[in-house]
């Protein structure tokens, strides 16, 4: 576990950054996949590496949308330069969830280990220039091509790399919970701490979102159990890899011995089927049994189009400068609430099902879970309070194919999770000269820069926050509202082919 920043100079920049006010925003960027062999005008059938006689669509200067080609460096550099110009003065930190090398999809140009290292170094150097040099912490994760092979997390093999990693994760969560910290799960750990330093950044590794089909079963069951056991500590899960914009749940039912893996054919169909199984009415739902996973779309236009996400989170009560908790009554109250949560709200779930008595299941992880679960309806993952995620705005590049050396690319707002009414201050806040907009007005479409709009295609969800109850509410709405469901599907695939 290493703290972001590797020199006294960079550490001092971080200290100065956190002495200033928090903006309550952070950037999530993933799956850049730069390709040094990309050739504008080459055929897409050659991975955009060379011309051929198949007459497949040519590669564009900034990328080939909806293709199997990776990103040219022109797109990588433009994206990070755009973020430098438009966002570095308005965010607190960056979540960067891998993959930074091209796919190994061209037999004529096999990808080497040295190339993977070189591409990661190139992207890291650019991230250093754009963010770290300005005192903006970056929390990186390794991509799925850069990790040590996992053998399956078998309970009887404690030296399996997957078990070692999850053992480490369990110890860290125990430690952070005992210190009343809040955690973003990104494969890495991002820790929000309420003490004399507003935020601490720690890193480990990760990239692939947790699911029954992407993880070894035993690894997945352990990961789900840890998320639910530490629900009062974990704010949420942020991932990439799939390049499909969506959310899902980690559900207590998934570690039930009778649960079978879904075989639905597409991500969308699987999600809607899962959402249809959420018990109703939601007022009677056991929120203790859920954790949320957010999967972001990718920078690489493979197989869709470039995209990034800006989250907002609750900083209520934090002043413009770091201060000792003991000098602020509001922060004292929050700290006391966190201490209370650390001591209470434990439930022990005993997995003593008949299957666990059978020899073939005795070494299954699902038959070993016997530690108390920590949950609380007042925790930031359940109720909008300090550190809670409150929303996000998704930006994308729908006209990628139109841009070339003479026509600069443009990122546009795709959609937001916020209610439309929150884009501008209410009557009471209009007199505040330093009012902070949830999204800077200059980055909104022209039609949203002035107050008064009563509906907008950019705000289809109207979520008050991104707590577990809000996500469950949206999930149930998606099963009932066909128009909203089609809009959700459109955001997932950005006009591309459903996978």
Image: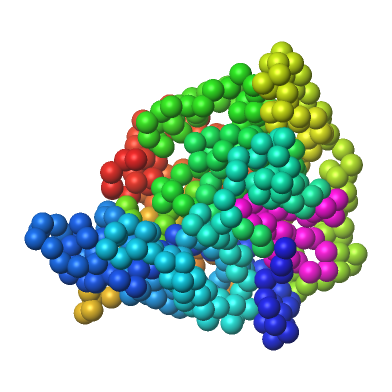
Residue extending farthest bottom: 9
Write the residue at 70% across / 31% down: 365
What percent of the width, then of the height, locates residue 490?
34, 44
Write the residue at 86% across / 45% down: 342
Residue extending farthest top: 354
Q: Is residue 252 left or right of residue 267?
A: right
Name above or below for residue 382 compared with residue 406: above
What percent of the width, then of the height, locates residue 339?
88, 49
Quadrant of the drawing holding the C terminus: top left
Q: Which residues are magenta?
A: 175-202
Name above or below for residue 324 compared with residue 177: below
The residue closer to the viewer here, 117 or 211, is 117
The residue closer to the viewer here, 217 or 281, is 217
Q: Is residue 253 left or right of residue 420?
A: right
Quadrant of the drawing holding the N terminus: bottom right
Here the colouring is rainbow
Residue 422 part of the magenta segment: no
Name above or below for residue 366 compared with residue 168: above
Q: Is residue 221 left or right of residue 85?
A: right
Q: Is residue 59 left or right of residue 446?
A: left
User: Residue 470 is drawn in which quadrant?
Assistant: top right
User: Residue 156 is drawn in which quadrant?
Assistant: top right
Write the residue at 66% across / 60% down: 204
The residue closer to the viewer here, 75 or 413, is 75
């Amino acid at each position: 576990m290493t703290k972001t920043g590797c020199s006294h100079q960079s550490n001092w920049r971080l200290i100065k950054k956190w002495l200033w006010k928090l903006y309550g925003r952070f950037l999530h960027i993933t799956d850049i996949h730069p390709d040094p062999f990309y050739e504008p005008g080459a055929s897409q059938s050659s991975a955009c590496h060379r011309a051929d006689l198949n007459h497949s669509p040519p590669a564009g200067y900034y990328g080939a949308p909806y293709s199997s080609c990776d990103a040219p460096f022109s797109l990588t550099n433009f994206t990070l330069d755009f973020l430098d110009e438009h966002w570095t003065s308005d965010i607190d930190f960056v979540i960067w969830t891998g993959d930074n090398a091209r796919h190994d999809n061209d037999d004529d140009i096999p990808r080497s280990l040295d190339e993977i290292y070189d591409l990661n170094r190139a992207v890291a150097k650019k991230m250093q220039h754009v963010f770290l040099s300005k005192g903006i912490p970056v929390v990186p994760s390794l991509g799925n091509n850069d990790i040590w092979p996992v053998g399956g997390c078998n309970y009887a093999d404690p030296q399996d790399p997957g078990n070692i990693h999850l053992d480490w994760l369990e110890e860290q969560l125990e430690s952070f919970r005992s210190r009343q910290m809040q955690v973003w799960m990104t494969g890495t750990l991002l820790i929000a701490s309420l003490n004399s330093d507003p935020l601490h950044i720690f890193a480990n590794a990760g990239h692939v979102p947790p699911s029954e089909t992407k993880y070894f079963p035993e690894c997945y069951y352990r990961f789900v159990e840890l998320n639910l056991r530490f629900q009062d500590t974990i704010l949420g899960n942020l991932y990439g890899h799939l390049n499909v914009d969506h959310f899902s749940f980690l559900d207590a039912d998934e570690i039930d011995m009778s649960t079978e893996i879904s075989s639905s054919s597409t991500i969308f169909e699987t999600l809607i089927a899962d959402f249809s199984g959420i018990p109703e009415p939601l007022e009677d739902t056991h929120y203790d049994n859920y954790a949320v996973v957010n999967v972001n779309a990718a920078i690489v236009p493979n197989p869709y189009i470039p995209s990034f996400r800006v989250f907002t989170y609750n900083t209520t009560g934090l002043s413009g400068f770091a201060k000792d908790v003991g000098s602020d009554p509001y922060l004292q109250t929050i700290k006391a609430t966190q201490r209370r949560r650390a001591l209470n709200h434990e439930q022990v779930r005993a997995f003593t099902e008949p299957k666990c008595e059978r020899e073939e299941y005795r070494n299954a992880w699902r038959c070993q879970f016997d530690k108390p679960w920590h949950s609380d309806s007042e925790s930031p993952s359940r109720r909008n309070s300090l550190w809670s995620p409150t929303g996000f705005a998704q930006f994308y590049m729908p006209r990628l194919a139109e841009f070339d050396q003479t026509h600069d690319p443009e990122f546009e707002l795709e959609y937001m999770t916020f209610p439309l009414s929150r884009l501008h201050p209410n009557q009471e806040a209009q007199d505040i000269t330093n009012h902070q907009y949830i999204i800077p007005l200059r980055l909104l479409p022209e039609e949203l820069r002035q107050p008064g709009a009563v509906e907008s295609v950019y705000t289809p969800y109207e979520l008050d926050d991104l707590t577990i109850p809000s996500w469950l509410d949206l999930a149930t709405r998606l099963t009932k509202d066909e128009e909203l469901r089609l809009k959700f599907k459109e955001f997932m695939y950005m006009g591309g082919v459903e996978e």
